[in-house]
Amino acid sequence: MGKKELGRILTVLNNKYKIKIERMKPFYILVHGILSTRTKDETTFPAQYRLLKIANTPRKLSKLDTSVVKKLIYPVSFYKTKAKLLKKTANMLLDDFNGKVPSSKEKLLKLPGVGPKVASLVQVWGFGVAAIPVDTHVNRISQRLGIVPKGNKPEDTQIVLESILKPSQRMIANHVLVTFGKDICRPTAPQCYRCQIYQYCKFERKGYYKNRVL
Ligand code: SF4
């Protein structure tokens, strides 16, 4: 798929969802990213709120006992592990980064619990860097559209998407595709019958789902 085609797809979807990126505190995005891994938004956001209400800086978080962090973030998935990672991350921010969340991907990836997706989330929402966080929605849709081959790893999909899209498109790509993935191009039973980018899609079962109105 070429630049123009993918650009058109993003334009169509963004006309529908009207995504705007509003900068937030990098530390908040970092906490959100770590908590959100394999956890639904409806669980992540309340847990994030409870934790940040008490510890909204790396220093405050570093002073909390791990058992308290566990209680605050429960029931996010892997909450015991994530509580330890959050504490380690807070300590590393204090020890190695002067208490501030770094903006470079290279440095972000040094933080415990931070992989390519979380690092890119922090870059986009915290610093306005034109990166594309690739989660399960973005990766699945990229494969169905034929932008990347089936079974592609998220980090490889990110490289392909970032090489195709211009910076302004990169900024919104994650949010647009995640919204589309929850709304229409769902993991199981995609709603192809009401898909506005049907014509661009290479998914081999799109015809089947087009005729299957749920
Ligand atoms: S046609 Fe179906 S599979 Fe293809 S992008 Fe649209 S919803 Fe997803």
Image (spheres, grey):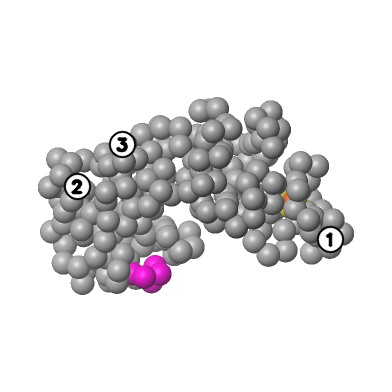
Crowding near pointer 2: few (<14 within 10 Å), some, many (20+)?
Answer: many
| Residue at image location 52% in from the left, 36% down from the top | 162
Q: Residue 16 appears at what percent x and percent y?
A: 68, 39
| Residue at image location 32% in from the left, 36% down from the top | 104
Report the front residue among 92 and 191.
Answer: 92
- SS at mark 1 in the image: helix
| Residue at image location 21% in from the left, 40% down from the top | 100
Q: Is residue 102 left or right of residue 179?
A: left
Q: Is residue 94 left or right of residue 118?
A: left
**Quick check: is 78 in the magenta stretch?**
yes
Q: Amino acid at mark 1?
A: Tyr
The residue tagged 3 is: 103
What segment is highlighted magenta in the picture? 75-79
Q: Residue 15 appears at what percent x and percent y?
A: 67, 34
The residue tagged 2 is: 93
- SS at mark 2 in the image: helix
Q: State how far apart marks 2 and 3 are (Cα).
A: 12 Å
Ranked by sequence position, the earlier of labels 1 and 2 is 2
Ranked by sequence position, the earlier of labels 2 and 3 is 2
Q: Is residue 204 above or below residue 74?
A: above
Residue contact between numbered discs 2 and 3, judged by CB atoms under 8 Å: no
Q: State how far apart marks 1 and 2 are (Cα).
A: 50 Å
Report the front residue among 164 and 94.
Answer: 164
Inspect this view and state whether residue 49 appears: no
Q: Residue 150 appears at what percent x and percent y?
A: 64, 55
The residue tagged 1 is: 208
Q: Amino acid at mark 2?
A: Leu
Inspect this view and state whether residue 143 appears: yes
**Quick check: is 105 in the magenta stretch?**
no
- SS at mark 3 in the image: loop
Residue contact between numbered discs 1 and 2, judged by CB atoms under 8 Å: no
Ranked by sequence position, the earlier of labels 3 and 1 is 3
